[in-house]
Amino acid sequence: DSGVTQTPKHLITATGQRVTLRCSPRSGDLSVYWYQQSLDQGLQFLIQYYNGEERAKGNILERFSAQQFPDLHSELNLSSLELGDSALYFCASSVVGWGATNTGELFFGEGSRLTVL
Amino acid sequence: DAKTTQPPSMDCAEGRAANLPCNHSTISGNEYVYWYRQIHSQGPQYIIHGLKNNETNEMASLIITEDRKSSTLILPHATLRDTAVYYCIVRTNTGNQFYFGTGTSLTVIP
C-alpha cells in the first residue's frame, strides 16, 4: 500500500460525458502528479501540482483539467470524452516538488480505469 | 519527454541475474536516474535511484557508467514475481518531474 488513494477504481461512461477522478496523496506529500496509460502504452505525464499550484504540464488535452485543493487532494476532470480517452489514470505523490535536488521518488496509487463507450 | 532508451523486452531464467540496460546520453550533470517497475496494470513501484555512484538496496543494484550516459539495473536473483515492465527515468531537477518511456518488459522464465 503506497498510501495514495484513488477513486473510483473503475468507471464506465459514454462519449461526450464528463468525469472526475479523485486522488488523495500520502500524508505530508505536497506534490501530486497525474499520468495517463492507454492500452499497452507507457505512462504519459499529464500535469503536476505542488502545494495547490500548477507546476508543470505534459501532454494534457484542453478537454482535461485538474486542481489541487487546500487539503492537498487533487481532482482530474475529463470532459467531452472520446473513445480514445479510455485508459488507466494514475495519480502519484511526492514529498518534494519545485526545486528539489534529491530523493523525490513518486508513490503511485492503484489507478482509475476509465472506459468510454 | 522521455530522455531514455530501453530495449522493449527481455527474458531471464529464474534464479539468474537480470541485467536491464538504459541509455540516457543527454543526461545533465545533476539529473538523477530512477528505476520503477509496473507489475501488470498496478501502480508503478519505486526500485532505486542514483546520481553518479553505484547504488544497492534490498531490491536491486544500479550501475551507472562513469560518463553517466548509460546505466544498468541488476536484479541479482530473478523470481517469477519480478516479471514486469521496468522503466528507466531521468528526473528533471527544476520541478521533480518524471517522464516515463515505454520501458522494458522483463519476463522471468521458470
Image (cartoon, helix red, strand yellow):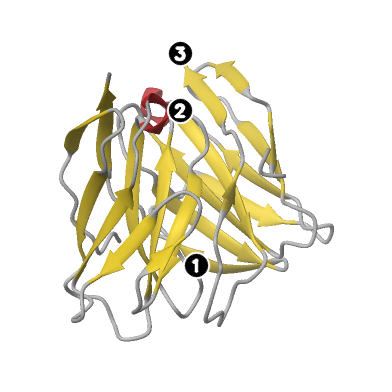
Left or right? Give the position of B11 relative to A21.
left
- Residue under label 3, please give it: A117
Left or right? Give the position of A12 relative to B89.
right
**Which label sits in the foreground, 1 or 2?**
2
Image quarter where the C terminus of chain A lies is top left
Which residue is located at x 57 percent, y 33 percent?
Answer: A111
Q: Position of residue A50 (x, y in %)?
A: 65, 68
Indicate which disc residue A56 carries.
1
The crowding category of the residue bearing disc 3, from other C-alpha atoms within 10 Å (few below 14, some 14 to 19, many at least 20), is: few
Distance between mark 1 and mark 2 Cα atoms: 25 Å
Left or right? Give the position of A7 relative to B14.
right
Q: Which one is in front, B94 or A66?
A: B94
Distance between mark 2 and mark 3 Cα atoms: 21 Å
Q: Position of residue B21 (x, y in %)?
A: 20, 54
**Which label sits in the foreground, 3 or 1?**
1
The crowding category of the residue bearing disc 1, from other C-alpha atoms within 10 Å (few below 14, some 14 to 19, many at least 20), is: some
**Given the image, what chain letter belongs to the residue carrying mark 1?**
A
